[in-house]
Image (cartoon, rainbow, N blue to C red):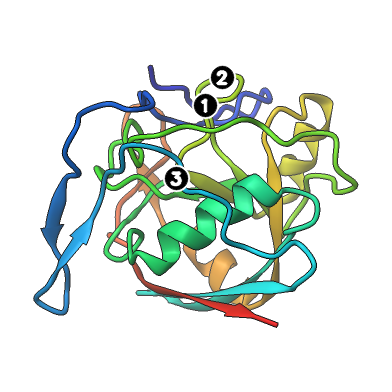
Amino acid sequence: MKKWVRAALILTTAAAMSAGCGTQPAQEQGSGGGERQTSFDKAPEMQIDEAKSYEAVVKTSKGEFTIELFAKDAPVTVNSFVFLSRQKYYEGIVFHRIVPDYIIQTGDPTGTGRGGPGYSFEDELGGPHEYGPGIVAMANAGANTNGSQFFICTGEWSKKLNEIPNYTIFGRIKDGMDTVLAIGATPVGGMNNDTPQEKITIESITIHES
């Protein structure tokens, strides 16, 4: 089931995904000529250290930005994001949805708003952070359906999400908000006027641990 972002507080998200769907991981050719895994049988075991700090440097076709990851506040979410990033899962994935002055959304390997990593995991809500420009949160298709899709808040309208705080906040933009805003300024069209008219891709995500 696909959910659409609307200014009336309904965040587009996506994802018809089910845990344990399929028995063999899907693979496709990566940019380096090797194969990268795009589907997994189950969520990863915990591999991050909540006492450490994590940042993700995201290189896109529009520029670069850095996400400070909230490992203490959303450890399960950050663990999944770090795992997928280290697996190069996000490489080549497009920003498939842009709502001007609201959010940009990515993380779906199919680019349709319906894809995911083959597993889902629980929400981590009620943390100390609020939605607003620069906040990074998980997209979902209902309670406890997080996968790989996430969104970045770009404008003041995103603060309205604090009235329905149903999306796990797991980071914030530390550097490169100008790149995020440039992506958010991409012309859009389509039936819901939120489909980018320019292909913008994630080229790489590098995780730094300290």
- How far apart are the two marked residues, 2 and 3, measured between alpha carbons? 14 Å
Residue 160 found in image quarter:
top right
The secondary structure type at the circle numbered 1 is loop
Q: Earlier in the sequence, mark 2 or mark 3?
A: 2
- Inspect the image, locate mark 3, and give the three-letter code of the amino acid beneath it: Ser
Say whether residue 63 is left or right of residue 169. left
Q: Which label number is shown at residue 142?
A: 2
Q: Nearer the viewer, residue 131 or 185?
A: 131
Tell me, yes or no, if residue 100 can be seen here.
no
Question: In which quarter of the view is residue 173 placed?
Answer: bottom right
The residue closer to the viewer here, 88 or 20, is 20
Disc 3: which residue: 148
Total numbered badges shown on the rendered structure: 3
- Labelled pair 2, 1 in contact (Cβ < 8 Å): yes
What's the residue at 85%, 42% (across, down)? 127
Q: Which secondary structure lies at badge 3?
A: loop
